[in-house]
């Protein structure tokens, strides 16, 4: 796919296939706003001068780093256009990653570990990332011929092989997660707290009191780290939580209260603004 096609893909935030893989090498000036997707993303960084911001943390990428961006995780890259930005990007749907074997082992293990540790970049030992990259390059080559006889099945097998190998390395090398991200400790703590208390009463005043910090200082630091105001961030996370509830079969009215809203009309209005459709039409 061309650069232009991928920009449109990113902008819309939709993934219509179970998985996709791209190889991009940019030499032009690009700016990305903070954003999130409903699908999952793995970036293999080849070269460039890039800082990747994910949920309040900033990672300065090195060659052979892998960035793990889960669904609904807020992120953006900051790119120095003086150096070519070369990377491979893998898009993965929730449905594809939901596949498990008879023992219940999940393809999503790597993303679960990233979410649990709040660390989003991994750097494996050379012999490990060489095997993973070989598999990645094979995926790219197979996708070029996916229209051939049984090519779709061969492509799925390649993606499965990649994810199995990647997850195994995550399990074998737990210290592969990069811990040198730059971040404001209070902001990251607040982000974690919000994620764990979405159903409760929450606003900037409550958070400032909870973390013994000036409300206005927290608001400035939070906006700088995430691109969102605290109010916007809480709303985004609550609506995404409500969407998951409704899709799993919960009535929209119950989801409204379960995810922290106290008024259904306000909830429905926010839901339509963020998701693009009313909650009653989603279920």
Image: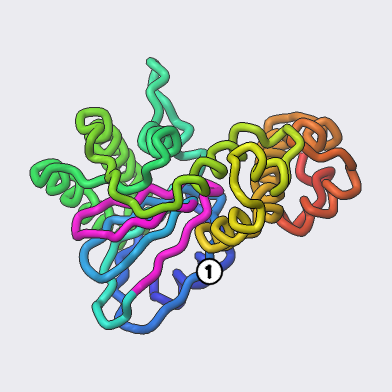
Magenta range: 56-79
- Residue 30 is situated, as x and y percent measured from the top left of the image, at 42, 78
> Where does label 1 land, which residue?
33
**Which is more toward the observer, 274 or 6?**
274
- Residue 273 is situated, as x and y percent measured from the top left of the image, at 76, 59
Name the image quarter holding the N terminus: bottom left
- Residue 186 is situated, as x and y percent measured from the top left of the image, at 50, 46
Residue 46: in magenta span = no
Left or right of residue 24: residue 95: right
Name the image quarter holding the C terminus: top right
Left or right of residue 188: residue 255: right
As displayed, is residue 58 above or below residue 99? below
Outermost top residue: 103
- Judge whether residue 254 can be spotted in this image: yes
As displayed, is residue 109 above or below residue 58? above
Where disc 1 sits, the SS reads loop
- Residue 262 is situated, as x and y percent measured from the top left of the image, at 86, 38
Residue 68: in magenta span = yes
Left or right of residue 84: residue 197: right
> Where, by quadrant of the figure, is residue 11 drawn?
bottom right
């Amino acid at each position: 796919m061309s650069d232009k096609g991928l920009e449109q893909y990113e902008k819309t935030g939709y993934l219509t296939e179970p998985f996709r893989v791209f190889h991009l090498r940019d030499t032009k000036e690009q700016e990305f706003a903070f954003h999130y997707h409903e699908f999952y993303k793995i970036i293999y960084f080849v070269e460039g001068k890039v800082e990747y911001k994910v949920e309040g943390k900033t990672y300065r990428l090195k060659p052979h780093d892998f960035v793990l961006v889960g669904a609904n995780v807020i992120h953006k890259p900051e790119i120095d256009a003086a150096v070519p930005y070369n990377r491979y990007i893998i898009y993965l749907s929730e449905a594809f990653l939901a596949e498990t074997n008879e023992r219940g082992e999940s393809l999503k293990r790597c993303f679960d570990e990233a979410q649990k540790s709040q660390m989003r970049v991994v750097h494996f030992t050379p012999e490990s990332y060489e095997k993973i990259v070989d598999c990645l390059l094979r995926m790219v080559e197979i996708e070029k011929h996916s229209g051939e006889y049984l090519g779709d099945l061969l492509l799925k097998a390649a993606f499965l092989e990649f994810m199995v190998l990647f997850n195994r390395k995550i399990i074998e090398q737990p210290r592969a997660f990069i811990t040198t991200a730059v971040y404001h400790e209070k902001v990251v703590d607040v982000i974690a707290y919000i994620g764990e208390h979405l159903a409760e009463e929450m606003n900037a005043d409550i958070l400032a009191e909870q973390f013994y910090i000036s409300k206005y200082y927290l608001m400035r630091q939070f906006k700088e780290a995430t691109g969102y105001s605290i109010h916007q961030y809480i709303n985004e996370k609550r609506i995404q939580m409500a969407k998951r509830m409704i899709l799993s079969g919960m009535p929209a009215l119950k989801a409204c209260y379960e995810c922290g809203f106290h008024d259904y009309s306000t909830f429905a209005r926010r839901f339509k603004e963020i998701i693009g459709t009313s909650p009653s039409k989603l279920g």
